[in-house]
Image (spheres, rainbow, N blue to C red):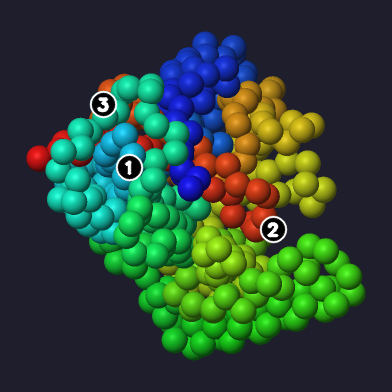
Amino acid sequence: MTSIRRLCRALAALAAGLVTGACTSEAPASGDALPAAEFLFAAGDSTYWVRSSGEGMRVRSAPILLTQVDGRLFEVFLVDDGAEYPDASFATARLWARALQSRDSTLLFADSTVMRELVAWRKANPSETEIDPNDEETPDDPRTVVHDEIEIIDVHGPYLTFEHLLNADIDGGPPHQHRGRRYVVDVRSGHLATLTDLFGGAEAAKLIAQARASLTQLTDSIRQASTSGDDRASVAVETLDSFRFDSTSFGITDLSRDPAVAFMVPGYSADGEALALYLPPIAVKAPSWWSAVRATLPEWSTDSSRVRWERSGYEVMATPSEDGDALALVLRARGLTTSRAEWPVATVAAPAYQLIALEPPPLDSASRAALARAFDRSTALDGLVQRAVWRAPRASLFTPRTVLRRTSFLPQP
């Protein structure tokens, strides 16, 4: 039995070499006045807090995921729980959100399967001793493995798209479980949104009909390729009948800053492993809540050489490196008399996700203090780790997010 193990890395290490925790540039020379600007820029595995004025520019980075809803900033994070035994491994994740000026967090998603199986296993194996989570000699291939994984896909204003995968192989227990699906959740309430919630009944019906047609076209193409001798298609045909369209397994994405929906169709391999077909994104009529989201999304130039975000007094532009792994971020003035066209901000890891302008109106002192605390906490709290999940490339416009995780281990009663 193959154990599902996760790669963990220190959060702060990912930003090293790109942007330090906080850096400040000197005030510009006369005639080179920096535009007044303050924004959050999400790229790679970090968020960058940029403040610019006549006194200079300050840039701070942290491995944190933030979104703005109706002028309020929300932090999204994952909490990991687990228990390790010589011949059993249990790990689960819970998804949370917190308004920065609130002390209370909202549970967005949790699956009870892992905890339920852990309680049952402990009752059946009372003499087993739990392994210290810091012990490097943990077993590589326990006979019982019950893990679930939450992967952040993207966030658009109030709505977070994520994927959940459960793998349960219990020695001497019921048949193994392997299942996965995609969700959209409201960060304000924890409500799992439906297509009707997001886009209205009429648009939801159109989306479902288009998605079913897309799935039929995709599976027919695979079958046709198989009959033509394509070896890969022949292998794929063996699992096609396991895929069942689920109208609730979808995520929000964007096409040229306009809203779109991407469905994930769950299926199974011959040995019961979870599989997924990712249908091409389907454009949808923009709902009223999308106007605030659109302003945060990147706009590519026609030749794809630059991406930009435009504001009333400034614009932010990013140029990809030759290998596409990094972005050179610059700030440009608009409507100001200045002898300088642009100012370098930072070189950050690609891809770029969103830019949240923090003015106008400017942040009040309470909001600024709450944002500073969130940045401090994300880089200084003991026990923070980041989980990197490597998958084979897939044809999808989604780029998985790696976000703040807080790890704890469940004590044995």
- Quadrant for the C terminus in the image: top left
Q: Nearer the viewer, mark 1 or mark 2?
A: 1
Label 1 – label 2 distance at C-alpha: 35 Å
Residue on which the image places disc 1: 88
For the point 38% across and 37% down, which residue is it? 404
Which comes before the other along the chain, label 1 or label 2?
Answer: 1
Looking at the rendered structure, the kind of residue marked 3 is: Asp
Q: Under tag 3, what secondary structure?
A: loop
Label 3 – label 1 distance at C-alpha: 13 Å
Residue on which the image places disc 2: 395
Q: Is residue 322 left or right of residue 195?
A: right
Residue 29, x across and y down, in percent = 59, 12
Looking at the rendered structure, the kind of residue marked 1 is: Ala
Residue 155, x across and y down, in percent = 46, 54
For the point 79% across and 52% down, which residue is it? 302
- Choose top left, top right, bottom left or bottom right for residue 159: bottom left
Residue on which the image places disc 3: 132
For the point 33% across and 39% down, which residue is it? 87
